[in-house]
């Protein structure tokens, strides 16, 4: 069957997160764990299912935005469900204003999403603390919502929707909730989580897992007292985030891995954050990463021929690309960054508008993207980039933090540990 250009274009949408529970999405999924220095998803799953199935756990998961964390977490969600756990996965950016987040906002979002998920399996909650709290809050904020008329999830949603769009209302609610944080955590544990776990086990479930995605997208804005938001939430308030009595997985900003506060962060959570690195299309010594390249090729070909085997797809490569070397150029220029790879491929399809895709079209897309990214780089940052290129390492100062947050530098892992390389889309002035 002839490849449909429009379907191929839609399948390469870089904004789409694959949900491997979906049969069609599963056909697009490529498992990169063999080249990423370890199977982090298996480690996260084992920590819950094997080592501590009945004891609360809390894990931190990070990596560059767009490197595939959400897809891997959706895979973890599916595998945990197969193991018999009730899993609540949600994208925090749908509930929170990422420029301005406080610990109470996160706790309320978790309470809302858990209660909402429980309703779907016919478990309704009537937490007395929240009924009283929200009656007080609605009077305080002059909002017409009471938990006597609506479910817990709807009540929380009504309040959080209002504060998401209003900094003034948000500040008022925080001022009210801040001295009540300890009692809020206690109420979530006793009136929501404990009840939920008890009833879920009656239904044959092994426990409750909550996955809070997209907190890695927190803006690094400063709080009014000067503390950067990521450090405030995960270091200063980390102890409270981990106090919920269920299995928790938080995504966190990658920049925290290069912060002087990393030691305090790991002490607060009692775990080392797990980092999802790039797919190594080149190795530490500069040689071509054959294993990583093979998997990246398959990611493109799976979007074109989802119903074929890897071997069958490769045999039809010339229907998609003018020559195999052109696809290899895309793999290398992406640096093994999954979303960047799909973004370039998606733009390339729009540029050429016909198959097979041409080398000239790819070069045009690369030049356009390189110009967009390079405009933001200062001379001082180029000096730092050259140091990274030479040493394959970064240091913990602010300059390197900017390079990593801006995705000018990518992290990779091998048997020797972490190493770093300049984003290949930038070319080199070194």
Image (cartoon, grey):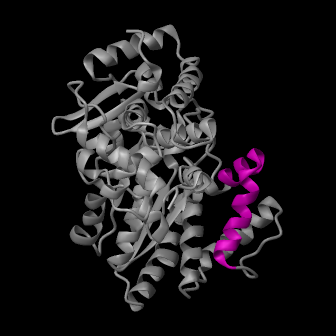
* Closest to the observer, 175 or 378: 378
Residue 249, picture quadrant: bottom left
Where does residue 416 sit, x and y in percent of width and height?
16, 35
Residue drawn at (47%, 45%) of the image: 320
Up-down: is 251 above or below 130? above
The span shown in magenta is: 151-175
The quadrant of the rendering that contains the C terminus is: top left
Residue drawn at 76 percent across, 75 percent down: 146
**Residue 156 falls within the magenta-colored stretch:** yes
**Residue at 53% from the left image edge and 72% from the top image edge:** 114
Residue 95 higher or lower than 272, as above or below: below
The x, y position of residue 306, in whole percent, is 44, 61
Q: Residue at x 39, y 56 (%)?
A: 72
Magenta span: helix, strand or loop, mainly? helix
Residue 214: percent from left, percent from top: 52, 50
Name the spot of residue 407 as percent of width and height, x first: 46, 30
């Amino acid at each position: 069957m002839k490849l449909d250009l429009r379907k191929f274009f839609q399948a390469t949408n870089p904004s789409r997160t694959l949900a491997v529970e979906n049969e069609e999405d599963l056909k697009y999924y490529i498992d990169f764990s063999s080249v990423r220095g370890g199977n982090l998803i298996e480690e996260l799953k084992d920590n819950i299912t094997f080592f501590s199935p009945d004891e609360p756990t809390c894990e931190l998961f990070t990596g560059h935005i767009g490197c595939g964390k959400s897809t891997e977490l959706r895979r973890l969600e599916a595998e945990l469900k197969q193991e018999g756990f009730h899993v609540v996965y949600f994208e925090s950016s749908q509930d929170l204003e990422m420029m301005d987040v406080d610990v109470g906002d996160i706790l309320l979002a978790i309470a809302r999403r858990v209660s909402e998920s429980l309703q779907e399996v016919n478990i309704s909650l009537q937490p007395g603390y929240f009924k009283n709290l929200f009656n007080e809050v609605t009077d305080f904020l002059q909002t017409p919502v009471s938990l006597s008329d609506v479910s817990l999830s709807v009540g929380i949603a009504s309040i959080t929707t209002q504060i998401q769009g209003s900094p003034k209302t948000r500040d008022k609610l925080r001022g009210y909730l801040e001295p009540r944080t300890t009692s809020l955590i206690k109420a979530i544990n006793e009136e929501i989580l404990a009840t939920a776990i008890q009833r879920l086990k009656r239904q044959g479930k092994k426990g409750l897992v909550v996955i809070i995605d997209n907190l890695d997208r927190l803006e690094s804005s400063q709080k009014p007292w000067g503390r950067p938001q990521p450090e405030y939430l995960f270091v200063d308030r980390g102890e409270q985030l981990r106090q919920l009595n269920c299995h928790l997985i938080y995504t966190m900003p990658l920049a925290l891995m290069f912060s002087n506060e990393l030691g305090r962060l790991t002490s607060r959570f009692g775990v080392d954050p797990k980092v999802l690195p790039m797919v190594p299309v080149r190795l530490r010594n500069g040689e071509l990463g054959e294993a990583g390249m093979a998997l990246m090729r398959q990611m493109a070909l799976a979007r074109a021929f989802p119903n074929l085997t890897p071997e069958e797809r490769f045999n039809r490569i010339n229907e998609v690309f003018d020559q195999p070397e052109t696809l290899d150029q895309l793999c290398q220029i992406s640096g093994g960054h999954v979303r960047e790879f799909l973004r370039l491929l998606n733009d390339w399809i729009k540029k050429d508008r016909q198959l097979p895709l041409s080398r000239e079209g790819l070069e045009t897309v690369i030049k356009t993207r390189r110009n967009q990214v390079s405009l933001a780089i200062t001379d001082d940052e180029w000096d730092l980039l050259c140091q990274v290129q030479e040493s394959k390492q970064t240091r913990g100062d602010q300059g390197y933090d900017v390079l990593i947050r801006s995705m000018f530098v990518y992290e990779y892992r091998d048997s020797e540990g972490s190493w770093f390389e300049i984003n290949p889309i930038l070319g080199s002035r070194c």
